[in-house]
Image (cartoon, coloured by chain):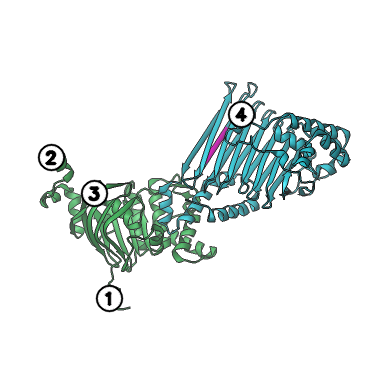
Amino acid sequence: MSGATMTQPILELRGLKVSIAEKPDIHIVKGIDLTIRPGEIHALMGPNGSGKSTLASTIAGSPTYVVDEGQIIYQGADITAMSADERARKGVFLSFQYPTPIPGVTMVNLMRESLKARRGAEVPAREFLAELRATLSKLKMSEDMARRYVNDGFSGGEKKRAEILQMGLLKPDLAILDETDSGLDVDALRTVSEGVNALRRPDMGILIITHYERILNYIEPDFVHILFEGRIVKSGGFDLAKRIEHEGYDPILKELGITSTKVAEGAAR
Amino acid sequence: MATSTATYSETAAREAARGRGEPAWLVEARAEAARAFTATSMPSPALRPWKYTDVSALDIEAFAPDAAFAPRVTGVAPAGGFAGSLAAALASHGEVVREHLGSVVPGTEGKFTAANAAQWREGVLVHAPRGQAFAAPVTVAVEGHEGAIFPRILIVAEPASEVSIILRTSSAAAPLLAAGVIEVVAQADSRVRLLIDTRWGAVTQEFTTLRARIGRGADVQVGSIVLGGHIVKQTVEALMEGEGSTSTIRGVAVGDTEQHFDFVTLQELIGKKSSSEVEIKTALAGASRSVYYGVTRVEPTAIGASANQENRNLLLSPRAKADADPVLEILTNEVIRCGHGATVGPVDQDALFYLQSRGLDMRQSLVLLVTGFFQSVISGLDAPGLVEELESALREKLATAELE
């Protein structure tokens, strides 16, 4: 491999602007540039409604959102117009904030189908089971979960663990963890975080989306970005997350001279 | 046309029955049914069970009965029992046939059932004698070609007996009318399982009435999987007469193109502590349509009864349609539980995106969602090998279904 290939970013967002497909007037992401290189963990933080989950879903290819401007470059290729399933087969993985229950479909069934799709080839039952067991044991999870229906009747913690289990099996090159820490108690948070750390590879990129810095105490990010009203207003290192932990978002926003446009618009009326 | 009209007349029915050497009582029953057929008009859409399946323009007499039609029965009956053609049973099990044929679905009841009673050929009798169990399921293959066929199946389960039947229907590409009648007599403490695998050709129209009379402590389970046919109307009725009798009706259907499915169920709870479940699910692609009308009637005598009926329809294409109408008629205050539910809706977009985000394309995702949706019904079908075969047939159909 040439040096250029080695340093090719996993993900590049170039001037990305996103709105809701059914409400094209509502612009949520208003111009984002972001580069994630192999081995890097980026944390995207911000208050509620700043556009974090929209960005996560858009990178994964959700049809709920449309890209108005800009590009999503993944491993050097423009995937802006690519379907969600094609992105997934190429190694993009989204751990959902609210994983959807799918009654009647077992985790095993889904995982086998998705592994088959990711590899583009049949996965013999024996091989699949061996990999599933290896992943379960790496994540310290029991086989019971694999036999249940997808996210059906799962507790908050189980849902997030099931997402990480799938991530472990699919071995993505880009993992987007959308509010993976929400709804978890301290023990569950530790289990899930340890799982992510165990699955981390030097050639993959991770984007952690979170409201609180909690999870970052377990999965230490290389870069922290603050998203506010659809724009990255500040980037820094782990210390930025620590500062948010102690001060919240307001002092940082004030320091940057940012006032909410929503508030401003409201005041103008 | 003139020939077939004559075929449906009383005289013709009587002569044909005599020609087949049928006993006098049956010849008379045929004649009576033929009279009822002539005297009865086609059901009007004004009648609730026919609201969405308008047959007023359908001319049964334009379909010449297929004289060569004969269902194929495979199965070994325990000692004293029977699994074979009704015609053959007239000789060996004449008393059983005479006692029960037409006792559950009278030949004078309606247009289609009268046509069946007058015109059925060969027929099928499955008879489980007292205390005996069939070692393996009996299979009945109904294969239609052209014209009209009148499948007639009589299932008699004597006290404490057990029998399982798999009915498979198929037909060629030529226009076919299939007017079936299935009678089930489930006597005390018997167990009857009937699984119907409907895979008619694209221009077949089916109108079948299945009715089970269920005695004390007896259990009847009917499963229906509908994949084929143009118009498929199946009326399934469970009369729970005995104390502690139970029934289950499960159905799944996958519609595509212009397919029209019409399910009518009746759960009539008469005996004390009787209980009944209905669960019918459809997935509809293309411009297909499903209609469901289900009545749960709890009679004043059915103290401590419980019943539930559910109809769920998944629309896979914007042109597909479903109507669901569950009705409860509760005539006693002392029911344990009586519920019903009906839904019609498109595929859950969040679930679809979730599966796509795991690398499954649109169609693979839909196949998984639909098989998951059917799981609650299919898992109850109690026919291990067959279930896998059905699931693969179902996947095959979904693989090419019209989603737009």
Cα–Cα gap, marks 2 and 4: 64 Å
How far across and how far down the image is residue A22, in percent? 33, 46
Inspect the image, locate mark 1, and give the three-letter code of the amino acid beneath it. Answer: Ala
The residue carrying mark 1 is A4
The residue carrying mark 4 is B47
Cα–Cα gap, marks 1 and 3: 34 Å
Q: Colour of chain A?
A: green
Secondary structure of the residue carrying numbered label 1: helix
Q: For residue B96, say whether it is visible.
A: no
**Residue B23 found in image quarter:** top right
Cα–Cα gap, marks 3 and 4: 58 Å
Mark 4, other Cα within 10 Å: few <14 / some 14–19 / many ≥20: few
How far across and how far down the image is residue B237, in percent? 66, 34
Q: Nearer the viewer, residue B314 or A218?
A: B314
Marks 2 and 3: in contact by CB < 8 Å?
no
Chain hosting mark 4: B
